[in-house]
């Protein structure tokens, strides 16, 4: 717990369950239910029940977002609960499903506390934590946290550098514009050399920076040809000797008719399960390794759709 590990992050159970080269897995974005945001307390037990069902049925991961404030113009507060505490709660009541953030807003995080929190969930979950990170995009939040939105790219790089130094070293001085540490250490250390670190969106950084400093790319849904090029660019930047996965978010409304064709396309689709299976096969061929499904705008209940995923869709990907 106080010593550095030689275990590669690719050997962690959460990473292995979610990301395999040449394969595609499916995850769920929380909240799973549409009314969870309005009635989080009433929904808490049911959310956990659905997460356990998804875990048993072969869903690879669940994902939460870091939305610290309720901003009326956005109309979205994600799962409502703090991502660190909520994932700890879920970790204590699950055994295998990976636990991801999509993403922690790094400019609002103290880098030493970021290292401590990430390693804590990593250890409490038995190596199931996947940390997606981003720069944030809600203008109202930046002054509330004493930040200038225009400097978020620099703040992100600096805090990630301090975070990684705290994770990778012991009793090593760390200095950044917001502080310095000497004669002390951040503990616990992660189970592996580091917690899997995933860039969400561009993070206001170049593709080359993301390929060098993170372990994967979480991207928003795009058309297949655009995403094909994104995957090619990502793999070229990463190089042939490493596997760094590519994932995308996807809003789904699974039609009751299994043969219903796909409609929509901006953030996702309304479609039957057979069209979904074909889509996922094509995404796998493109090089996408994981799809983060969001059911919040669906006409059917989330549970019905999860049942259909488990019974028909996931087996078709094996």
Image: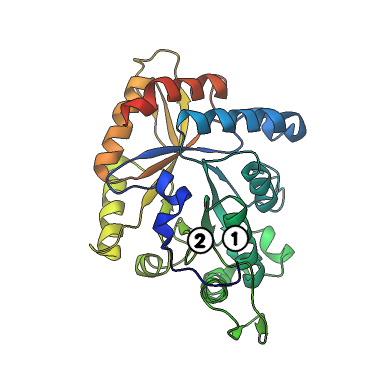
Q: Is residue 135 left or right of residue 48?
A: left
Tell me which corner region of the image, top left, top right, bottom left or bottom right, holds residue 121.
Answer: bottom right
Up/down of 59 relative to 134, above or below = above
Residue lying at 55% horizontally and 71% vertically, measured from the top left: 167
Q: Quadrant of the C terminus?
A: top left
Task: Evaluate whether residue 181 shows in this view.
Answer: yes
Q: Nearer the viewer, residue 210 or 58?
A: 58
| Residue neighbourhood size for the residue with mark 2, other residues' Cα within 10 Å, grouped as few (<14), some (14–19), many (≥20) | many
Tell me which corner region of the image, top left, top right, bottom left or bottom right, holds residue 106.
Answer: bottom right
| Distance between mark 2 and mark 1 Cα atoms | 7 Å
Dot 1 corresponds to which residue? 118
Task: Evaluate whether residue 137 shows in this view.
Answer: no
Please state the horizontal and vertical placement of residue 150, each as a whole percent of the image.
57, 70
What label does residue 195 carry, if any? Answer: 2
Residue lying at 72% horizontally and 48% vertically, measured from the top left: 70
Q: Are marks 2 and 1 in contact (CB under 8 Å)?
A: yes
Q: Is residue 226 left or right of residue 125?
A: left
Q: Is residue 268 left or right of residue 181?
A: left
Residue farthest to the top? 257
């Amino acid at each position: 717990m106080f010593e550095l590990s030689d275990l590669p992050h690719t050997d962690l159970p959460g990473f292995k369950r979610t990301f395999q080269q040449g394969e595609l897995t499916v995850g769920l974005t929380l909240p799973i239910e549409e009314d969870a945001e309005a009635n989080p307390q009433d929904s808490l037990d049911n959310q956990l029940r659905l997460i356990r069902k998804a875990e048993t049925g072969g869903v690879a991961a669940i994902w939460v977002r870091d939305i610290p404030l309720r901003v009326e113009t956005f109309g979205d507060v994600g799962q409502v609960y703090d991502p660190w505490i909520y994932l700890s709660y879920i970790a204590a009541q699950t055994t295998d499903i990976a636990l991801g953030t999509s993403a922690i807003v790094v400019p609002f995080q103290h880098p030493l506390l970021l290292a401590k929190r990430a390693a804590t969930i990593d250890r409490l979950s038995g190596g199931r934590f996947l940390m997606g990170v981003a720069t944030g995009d809600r203008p109202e939040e930046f002054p509330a946290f004493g930040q200038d939105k225009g400097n978020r790219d620099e703040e992100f790089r600096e805090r990630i550098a301090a975070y990684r130094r705290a994770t990778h070293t012991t009793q090593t001085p760390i200095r950044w514009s917001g502080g310095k540490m000497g004669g002390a250490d951040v503990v616990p250390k992660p189970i592996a050399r580091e917690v899997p670190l995933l860039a969400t969106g561009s993070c206001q950084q170049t593709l080359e920076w993301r390929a060098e400093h993170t372990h994967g790319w979480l991207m928003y849904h795009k058309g297949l040809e655009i995403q094909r090029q994104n995957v090619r660019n990502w793999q070229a930047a990463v190089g042939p000797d490493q596997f760094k996965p590519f994932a995308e978010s996807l809003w789904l409304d699974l039609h009751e008719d299994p043969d219903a064709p796909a409609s929509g396309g901006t953030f996702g689709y309304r479609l039957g399960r057979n069209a979904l299976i074909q889509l996922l096969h094509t995404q796998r061929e493109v090089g996408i390794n994981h799809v983060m499904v969001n059911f919040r705008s669906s006409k059917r209940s989330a549970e019905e759709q999860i049942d259909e995923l488990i019974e028909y869709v996931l087996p078709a990907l094996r």
